[in-house]
Image (cartoon, rainbow, N blue to C red):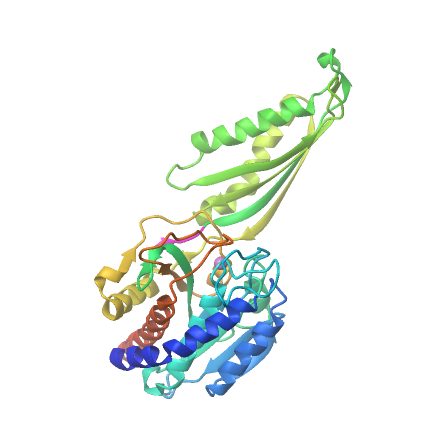
Amino acid sequence: MLSEITALAEKLAPRLIEIRRHLHTHPELSGEEYQTAAYIAGVLSSTGIHVTESVGKTGVVGNLPGVTAQHNTLAIRVDMDALPIQECNDFEFASAKPGVMHACGHDVHTTVGLGTAMVLSQLPEAIAGNIRFLFQPAEEVALGAKWMVEAGALKNTDAILGLHVFPTIPAQSVGIRYGALTAAADDLEIFIYGESGHGARPHQAKDAIWIASQVITALQQSISRTQNPLRPIVLTIGQIQGGRAPNVIADQVQMTGTVRSLHPETHANLPEWIENIVASICNTYGAKYKVNYRRGVPSVQNDFHLTQILERASREALGNEHVQILPEPSLGAEDFSVYLENIPGTMFRLGVGHQNRLNYPLHHPLFDVDESAIRTGVITLAYTAYKYFQQSEANHEEI
Ligand code: NI
């Protein structure tokens, strides 16, 4: 089956590069992927895949039924939104839309999803169960996965695969990670309410700026003294506002920040832990406070068993030298985790780095990919899907 998949991916490569360049020239922002969605629906329909549009706003779902009686459904998720960045690349297929750019490689993800659909629809014997392709909007604003799940996109699915391009991994290679791949990212807002007074008479006031500074210090030190160092937390206060004049003690301070964590237990306890620290300091100095903790996306926790299937399939398909087992997670965030709250899955990094050129990071106006990665992505996903169904059939027989 591997040679059939590889040969088809090879044959489709020029067409897939065309598709990727079309998407790259016509980027759309999160939640506004109307043309992109229509284009995807057109390509999927032409391969004979059953398409449902407007799933979770602009999402597209393609269903490829399996040929045997086996009922497992594997979801494959790719995202399709672009960023509000002015592209500085000067190649022919650079963004034609001022101020909007596929600087996070979601054009590549979409193309790999379409390529995998094309390959597997031509190899019905490769998939014993059903495949559901999810083309997700609005990943950059961490809303699209939620929209699609709420619209029922995961109904009757058993497992999910995802990918994200990575410029520091060379093209034709993939990066695989067991356990946490990305962090949970939450928003934090803290208000400190003191009492105003003359700058020369602090004893007659409650200095909200000084109390806020104690809060910040206590939060940072508490991470190092009260939290498990093997379960990292990054707490960044990115904004602070308070005070009216140099000689007037501030009565109010507002701080906002982001909180990143990897371990689900740590993540679960963060709001209470933060509030306790803020409360203890404010109580000590007689100030009032309010803490607004807003959950963002959870951490991507790759399923061990599915990651094992992915690793074996990748090693076989790409060769050991093209498979990196990633030693570290990232403290970035990815809303693939929203699917993983419902079903097990695994997400890998698709290398897109050029061999002999400077590789700009994701979200950079000069971000660019080695397009040979598209073929690698298609082979990896298609062969992992095949292996997944083989495995689940074997498990089925054991029962
Ligand atoms: Ni991205």
Q: Is residue 73 visible?
A: no
In this view, the residue in front, 33 or 219, is 33
**Is 144 above or below relative to 209?**
below
Left or right side of 292 for 339: left
Q: Position of residue 385 (x, y in %)?
A: 35, 74
Q: Position of residue 348 (x, y in %)?
A: 37, 61
Q: Quadrant of the C terminus?
A: bottom left
Main SS of the magenta part reads: loop
User: Which residue shows up at 38% across the image and 52% down it?
Assistant: 358
Quadrant housing residue 216: top right
**Is 199 above or below relative to 169?**
above
Q: Quadrant of the N terminus?
A: bottom left
User: Which residue shows up at 63% across the image and 27% down it?
Assistant: 212
Q: Position of residue 197 (x, y in %)?
A: 77, 18
Q: Is residue 17 visible?
A: yes
Counting every numbered tag in the picture gives 0
Q: Position of residue 375 (x, y in %)?
A: 35, 71
Residue 214 in magenta stretch: no
Left or right side of 140 for 394: left
User: Which residue shows up at 62% across the image and 36% down it?
Assistant: 239
Left or right side of 262 for 357: left
Quadrant housing residue 352: bottom left
**Is 126 above or below relative to 380?**
below
**Is 138 above or below relative to 210?**
below
In this view, the residue in front, 198 or 203, is 198
Q: Which residues are magenta?
A: 177-182
User: Which residue shows up at 38% across the image and 88% down it?
Assistant: 67
